[in-house]
Image (cartoon, rainbow, N blue to C red):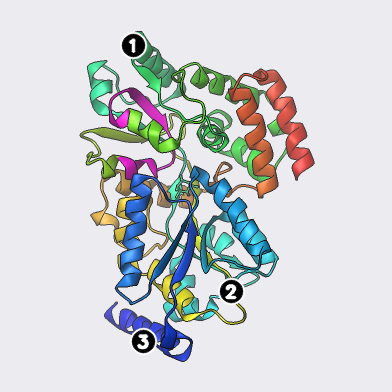
Amino acid sequence: MRKFLKTKSLFVAGLLCTTSLAHAEDVEVLHWWTSGGEAAALNVLKDDLSGQGIGWTDMPVAGGGGEQAMTVLRARVTAGNAPTAVQALGFDILDWADQGALADLNEVAAQEGWDDVVPDALKAFAKHDGKWVSAPVNVHSTNWVWANKAVLDANGIAQPTNWDEFVAAVEALKAAGVTPIAHGGQAWQDATVFDAVAMSTLGPDGYKAAFIDLDEETLGGDAMKEAFDRMAFIRDNVDENFSGRDWNLATAMVINGEAGFQMMGDWAKGEFLNAGKVPGEDFLCFRFPGTQDQVTFNADQFMMFDQGGTVSAEQAALASAILSPSFQIAFNKVKGSVPARTDVDGSDLDACGQQGMKDLAAAASSGNLFGSMAHGHAAPASVKNAVYDVVTAHFNGEYGSEDAVTELVDAVSIAK
Ligand code: GAL
């Protein structure tokens, strides 16, 4: 390890000297990490870089899931003013790589042996035509439930393990006058819940057929209608102010004991930690009932925009910092995600983080690891947006479950 680190710093030092570090430039980083927990995680990266003498120009674009950030990015690139590095997800990275907009990171990747340590599921989005075009910073997953332990205990509710137990728990909270489900009514949040509900209702084969293979029969089938019925149940058990609420404010409802559960990716854990809460004592994390053996993942990556030729020294240093083993642990402890490398020791992570790592490894080896539809890892943005539209319209009562499946089949077939 020491030899590796030494080689690594020599390599980065070399790049810094041979390229432009005589006048070190800041890295300008476009991202959507603006909640308390996300900002705390981002600080870990900023501090790491500042330790290397690299400055940071912050370009935050608020909006969970990153839709607004992607809109701003498109405008910046169109204006010929791409940021140095950009947080991005799955198919969006491949899309920019297809357009030839991204810098080639193969040199730093080869020096640091990324091919040997980054899992294939992430390489599928970090590499394009054999070229590394982005640096994965983490692995999140979307099929989690976050619960306030005191609220559950006070109402005699055990952690639900299947849909029927979940329904019973929700009914018990409602009867006790507690908001059962904290939710923010934004399309990406509705879709995040739908990831888990669909996985639980359709099973892993059905999830893959619908959202990765885009099979019409599955998209329009009875199990999909059942998934929409379950979404309607969830809609009936959120508070009346859910519309438009940011995800972290929904998390705060669970943190404060105003609500029992939130279905959200493990970035929610960053909010609990930022509020000083302890897993297992103050809050529970568990897989959405019926998805205990599956993981719907999304990995944040930083794609490096081609600034005219070779990768810049700052971009190489940023990429190198992002994938260093010590940074991977330090960052992911705060962010709620798990490392993007398979060779780091996760014993330093809290109970939820350790479960996340264990689940990820088990799902990868049993063939139960799937890209998240809601977070751009199942299908390209056009299809994702089509699913968002239908899930949100149904969630808001524009149509019932029967019509939702018909709409879903139509919308996906037009988008794909
Ligand atoms: C996801 C992203 C996470 C988290 C979340 C809410 O798309 O992967 O890192 O930030 O959005 O903003």
Whether residue 54 is visible, yes or no, is: yes
Nearer to the camera, 237 or 51: 51
Sequence-first tag of 1 and 3: 3
Q: Is residue 274 above or below residue 318?
A: above
Residue 155, position in %: x, y?
26, 15
Q: Residue at x 26, y 16 (%)?
A: 156
Q: The residue under label 1 is which amino acid type? A: Gly
Q: The residue under label 3 is which amino acid type? A: Leu
Mark 1: secondary structure: loop
Disc marking residue 10: 3
Q: Is 379 displayed left or right of 110 in the figure? A: right
Q: How many marks?
A: 3
Q: CA distance from mark 1 to mark 2?
A: 54 Å
Q: CA distance from mark 3 to mark 2?
A: 21 Å
Q: Which residue is mark 2?
A: 103
Region of the chain picked out in magenta, as a range: 254-271
Q: Is residue 124 above or below residue 313?
A: above
Residue 69, position in %: x, y?
55, 52
Q: The residue under label 2 is which amino acid type? A: Ala
Residue 125, position in %: x, y?
57, 60
